[in-house]
């Protein structure tokens, strides 16, 4: 009987005990009609208390592309949309996909008009193609531009009544939740940079604003990322460099982002929790490891296209960083990069076979990185010093107050060795352009609000000014 009484006593204690989890501070109740009160308390929190991990299924291996026809067969695909760009359509990665589709009798239509660094106009053209095609599966073969375009096409074909701005990130668009089920999408990345095969993000240039924005929702993430490192061997040296810089900044920014439990507001419903949630213990693991690979292999991958080990490792680093930032998010380097790319004047990047001026995404991101991390260093100095150490700097005798400067100097040295353009002035910008660059950064709050250090327009002006020259 003593045992029974002991159990009864414990049950009574549980029924009246206060739950100490961050989401609830009121008394726990065994009655179901109290659940709504707990939900109401969550809504009252100013900052979030949880984070969520989401990632595409990933298949990695040299030559793995030959399996894609079997995958589509296994999925029961009858009408496949294959998206790529005009340059890639003539290269081995697309040929490998087409060979596998043909071998396994998969019916498909090709869309090869994807724009490198897509715009709202090029997104809409791809969306129109998708709506008319009534496809049951999508395949994207290319870099981030192709994969992001295919994500958008799949999204709007699945929401045929939606207006274009319905899902675009606020405050530029409405940022509505995605409610319909999208069709399966298999992403076959051909660059080692964006990590788009892992994330629920699609980025484009909004031409009226002369700045990039995008759509961010877990529903966008591919069903499968088919990562075949053989596809990166065709990348010209500068494409490999700029793609690698995107990996570098994905890892650095997600590792130093505002912690998830300091991000506000706390979502009243899980459907409102953003894809970019702030740094968290799981994303940190991926960011650290991506940085280690970049430190060891990026220079080799840029210097020698035939270095299979280096190119393979960088493709894996892209995946690792993608999983990390796809859940933690990025901050000022990316937020500032969008108007840098969107306001491009005449710059034509080496290694890109396009007919329009272009600042490649990775380059637009990395050019501000020394200034940004010098600015953010004091908020989480241990992380800035750890990143500098991973990238090869001896930090054993460095004071915390110098963490930002040390990481900035580490990055300058790294970029100098890789012959990166000497700041924004080298790609056509002057100090007279700074107000428009600041103006284009302000709406990027989806990412800039994750900066560990709060910033003003004056701060942004200073960061752009400091990025005019690097060396």
Image (cartoon, rainbow, N blue to C red):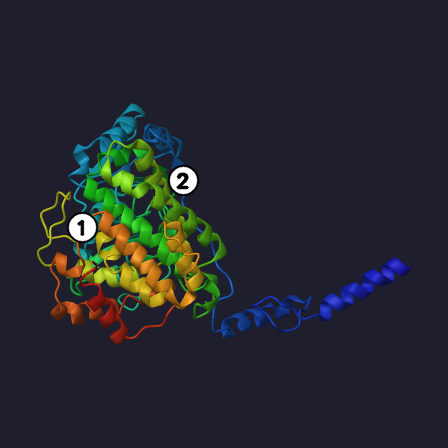
Quarter of the image where the N terminus is located: bottom right
Residue at image point 61% right, 72% down: 25
Judging from the image, what secondary structure is the residue with disc 1 in? helix
- 260 vs 140, left or right, is right
Can you give x and y, in whole percent of width and height, for residue 34 in the image?
62, 70
* Image position of 119 with respect to 44: above or below: above
Judging from the image, what secondary structure is the residue with disc 2 in? strand
- 57 vs 335, left or right, is right
Disc 1/disc 2 C-alpha distance (Å):
29 Å
Q: Which mark is residue 460?
A: none
Q: Nearer the viewer, residue 431 or 53?
A: 431
Label 2: few (<14), some or many (≥20) within 10 Å?
some
Quarter of the image where the C terminus is located: bottom left
Residue 84 occupies quadrant: top left
Q: Is residue 399 visible?
A: yes
Asked if marks 1 and 2 touch (Cβ < 8 Å), the reply is no
Can you give x and y, in whole percent of width and height, for residue 400 in the image?
42, 65
Q: Nearer the viewer, residue 455 or 149?
A: 455
Label 1: few (<14), some or many (≥20) within 10 Å?
some
Residue at image point 28% right, 50% down: 414
Residue at image point 29% right, 69% down: 171
Which residue was labeled with disc 2? Answer: 58
Q: Which mark is residue 125?
A: 1
- Sequence-wise, the earlier of marks 1 and 2 is 2
Mark nearest the camera among 1 and 2 is 2
């Amino acid at each position: 009987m003593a045992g029974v009484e002991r159990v009864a006593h414990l049950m009574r204690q549980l029924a009246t005990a206060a739950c100490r989890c961050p989401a609830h501070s009121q008394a726990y109740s065994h009655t179901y009609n109290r659940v709504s009160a707990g939900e109401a308390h969550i809504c009252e929190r100013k900052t979030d208390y949880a984070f969520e991990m989401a990632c595409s299924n990933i298949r990695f291996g040299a030559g793995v592309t030959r399996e894609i026809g079997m995958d589509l067969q296994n999925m029961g695909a009858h009408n496949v949309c294959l998206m790529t760009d005009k340059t890639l359509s003539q290269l081995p990665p697309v040929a490998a996909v087409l060979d596998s589709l043909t071998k396994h009798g998969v019916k498909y239509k090709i869309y090869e008009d994807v724009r490198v660094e897509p715009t709202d106009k090029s997104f809409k053209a791809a969306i129109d193609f998708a709506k008319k095609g009534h496809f049951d599966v999508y395949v994207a073969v290319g870099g981030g531009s192709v994969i992001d375009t295919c994500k958008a096409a799949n999204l709007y074909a699945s929401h045929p009544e939606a207006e274009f701005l319905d899902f675009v990130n606020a405050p530029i668009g409405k940022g509505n939740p995605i409610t319909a089920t999208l069709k399966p999408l298999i992403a076959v990345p051909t660059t080692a940079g964006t990590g788009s095969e892992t994330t629920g993000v699609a980025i484009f240039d909004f031409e009226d604003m002369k700045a990039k924005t995008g759509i961010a929702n877990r529903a966008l993430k591919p069903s499968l990322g088919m990562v075949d490192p053989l596809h990166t061997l065709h990348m010209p040296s500068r494409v490999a460099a700029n793609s690698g810089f995107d990996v570098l900044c994905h890892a650095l920014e997600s590792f130093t982002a505002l912690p998830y439990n300091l991000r506000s507001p706390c979502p009243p419903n899980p459907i409102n929790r953003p894809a970019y949630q702030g740094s968290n213990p799981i994303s940190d693991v991926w960011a650290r490891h991506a940085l280690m690979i970049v430190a060891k292999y990026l220079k080799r991958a840029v210097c020698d296209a035939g270095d299979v080990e280096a190119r393979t490792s960088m493709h894996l680093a892209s995946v690792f960083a993608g999983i990390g930032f796809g859940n933690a998010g990025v901050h000022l380097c990316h937020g500032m990069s969008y108007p840098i790319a969107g306001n491009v004047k005449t710059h034509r990047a080496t290694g890109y076979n396009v007919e329009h001026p272009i600042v490649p995404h990775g380059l637009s991101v990395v050019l501000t990185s020394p200034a940004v991390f010098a600015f953010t260093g004091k908020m989480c100095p241990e992380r800035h010093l750890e990143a500098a150490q991973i990238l090869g700097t001896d930090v054993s005798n460095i004071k915390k107050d110098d963490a930002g400067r040390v990481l900035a100097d580490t990055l300058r040295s790294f970029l100098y060795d890789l012959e990166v353009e000497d700041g924004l002035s080298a790609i056509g910008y002057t100090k007279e352009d700074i107000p428009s660059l600041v103006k284009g950064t302000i709406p990027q709050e989806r990412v800039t609000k994750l900066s560990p250090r709060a910033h003003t327009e004056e701060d942004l002006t200073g960061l752009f000014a400091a990025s005019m020259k690097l060396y």
